[in-house]
Image (cartoon, grey):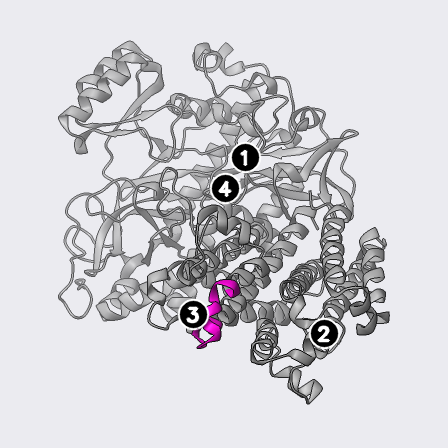
Amino acid sequence: MLGRTAASLFWMSRYIERAENIARLTEVGYRIALTPDIGSGHREDWQSTLIAAAGLNTYLERHSAITPEKVQHFLLFDRDNPSSVRSCLETARNNARAVRTALTREMWEALNSTYIDFTAVKASDLRSGKLPEFLDWVRQRSALFRGSMLGTLLRDEGFHFGQLGAFIERVDNTARILDVKYYVLLPTNESVGGDLDAFQWETILRSVSAHRSYRHVYKDRYRPWNIAEFLILRQEMPRSFRFCYGWIERSLEGLLEILGQSPQSRHDALAILSDLKSASMDEIFQSGLHEFLSNFIKRNNDLSSRIAHDFHFL
Amino acid sequence: MKFHAFNDQSGGTTRPSAGFDEMVRPDGSIRPAYQKLADWLSQQSRGLMAKKQEEAEAIFRRLGITFAVYGDSASNERLIPFDLIPRIISAKEWRFLERGIEQRVRALNAFLYDIYHRQEIIRAGRIPAELITNNEAFLPEMIGFDPPRKIYSHIIGTDIVRTGENDFFVLEDNLRIPSGVSYMLEDREAMMHLFPELFAAHRVAPVERYPELLRQTLESVAPAGCKGDPTIAVLTPGIYNSAFFEHSFLADQMGVELVQGSDLFVEDGALYMRTIAGKEKVDVLYRRVDDAYLDPLTFRPDSSLGVPGLFDLYRAGHVTIVNAPGTGIADDKAVYAYVPDITEFYTGQKPILQNVPTWRCAIKDECAHVVQNLDTLVVKEVHGSGGYGMLIGPHATKAERASFAKKIAAKPSNYIAQPTLSLSTCPSNVGKGPSPRHVDLRPFVLVGDRVRITPGGLTRVALKKGSLVVNSSQGGGTKDTWVLED
């Protein structure tokens, strides 16, 4: 397989995953703005959303004020924002077009029709409460793409690169969401936690579609300690660090089996995974949640670059 | 039996206004090859055809079969309109075309070999020396080099038009990098999907083997030193190229890599592609990149589409480039006028397919004739393609003709002229019902260990009423082409 093909599959998957995550973040922001009392603080929440979406600087270069309409437009439709849903779908599709032959027909059709339908939607179509429906649709289309890939793609090199892209993007997103709100998760907050904190905790869980699964796992009210553990260390949570790194390691292992060489990236991934396996929330809180999260985001980025290097992405 | 348009009778007419119609005779009766189709058409309602048309478009768009139109930024990906009504060619007509095409492509390959070697045809006085020496399409870098099997143009799309029962003309030879074969294959897929019962009622010669035959052809011209199965790759300029879909389609159908210039490099006397496990050797490169962009060290230094060092490697016989660089000298429009002589010179036989009479503006008397008769002629640029930069005299305004005359006067050798041919018409589905529209035909020819011609080819249709321009860049569409078996 060409290095460029591997790169395209990796980035295609990453951008589809990103489109889904941005849609989810936008939806959470929209919910907050609808909530009375707390809603009045929306400026701060939209700012958090922009930070989690890694778009605050780009946004501020272009807009002087944070308003819900502008942020939504920026996150969904803005061509100048490389992580807007539109840009993500376009980048994913361009990558897919370049390696059309490495995709199954189902994958291509899922992605191509999503892009075509998306480009037909105008921001003005989403007034009068149509936004949630639209964001649902984006997430469904991402799920359709993932499903097509899992259900139809040969388990060869291409599949592993697709998986790597999806999980590296997903874990990056989870880590950013946690880092933006890390202070509401600090144990010192738990005793003083009022309505506002409870609301923030729920927001974090909603941002990774985990507000219901949390209850299944913990059978308890929202507690910051549990939330952090759920998103970082629990291996049954499909957007947690631990879960994502399980798959990253498995994908690199799969590549090793096919190619017969053990690249540096696999050793790096193994090291991250074993750190996650042996970590406890006690240690993480003691050594500082924020430090832990920024360090993790950096290690995850480094791994992404290392993969690009090891497999000749160009 | 007389033909009636769709059964609701409200629609268009199939009666041709003038010229040769491939389905309906001047007296209104139906030619035998079209009889079943005509019967079937008369039973279809307009509503059904409209529904099928939508279905076809949805299929093409979903599959990503689009093409980019240069200079059209608003809609940089478009569907080529698909005409639902197939064109039918009888077995007898096809046998004739096949013989004629094979003769012509063999002669043109022999001509290319000669032109890049001893130039016997010039010594024999059959073509003027300046036709070659002053021609931008002549590539001095190719002089004295023997490509494998002495074949230069392996993949050819001969453009043929018809003006009468037995009158077929070759309009262009397209020996460089002809495109359109993916439309031939996808149009067939679509027709079998949309109208299985109509398809089953005919004995249609299959086209599906094309990718396999292409692969065999490419393998047959591997470099002499290549051991074992040659590795083939398709070189594309990338996703923004108008024919990218086709490049990707063909690579996929052949089961080979689709590469860009940046994926390739030359090292220790071999061409390699960069793979996830390191480098892999390439033996045959089916390039869909123009000569000028192939190798920045030999041709355009500013090109990033090609591979530095590729051409030297090719000349050393370590990789085969398909088609060979420099084939343009044989499909140049100024050389075109001599193809009948060329055919006779190398085959010793009379040409089977006719050439369109051509006036060369490079020759003084002929140029004068052209300028005086601009209102009846089609004038083309010698190096132009895709229907750009041409004048269709009878359809042009007086002012357009006058300004074109100036262009000719400024650089006569840049132009040739031909009579405006009355292209044959076939029934087309144009909304109102089946209605005759002008068509041409591009059969796809493969030249390797033998000549392989896929039955039929791509029929392009000028969907605008009365229009003679079939190019997709100018509002033309395509339709499936059925060669009937005996």
On the image, which quarter does residue A253 sit in? bottom right
Residue at 19% of width from left, 60% of height from top? Answer: B432
Q: Amino acid at mark 3?
A: Phe
Residue at 18% of width from left, 63% of height from top? Answer: B5
Residue range (magenta): A31-45
As helix, strand or loop, the secondary structure at mark 4 comes to strand
Whether residue A299 sits left or right of residue A151 in the image: it is right
Residue under numbered circle 2: A188
Q: Position of residue A242 (x, y in %)?
A: 76, 70
State the CA–CA distance, disc 3 to disc 1: 42 Å
Of labels 4 and 1, earlier in sequence is 1
Q: Which mark is residue B445?
A: 4
Q: Position of residue B298 (x, y in %)?
A: 62, 21
Q: Amino acid at mark 4?
A: Val
State the CA–CA distance, disc 1 to disc 2: 65 Å
Main SS category, magenta section: helix
Q: Position of residue B161 (x, y in %)?
A: 32, 40
Residue under numbered circle 1: B289
Q: Chain of mark 2?
A: A
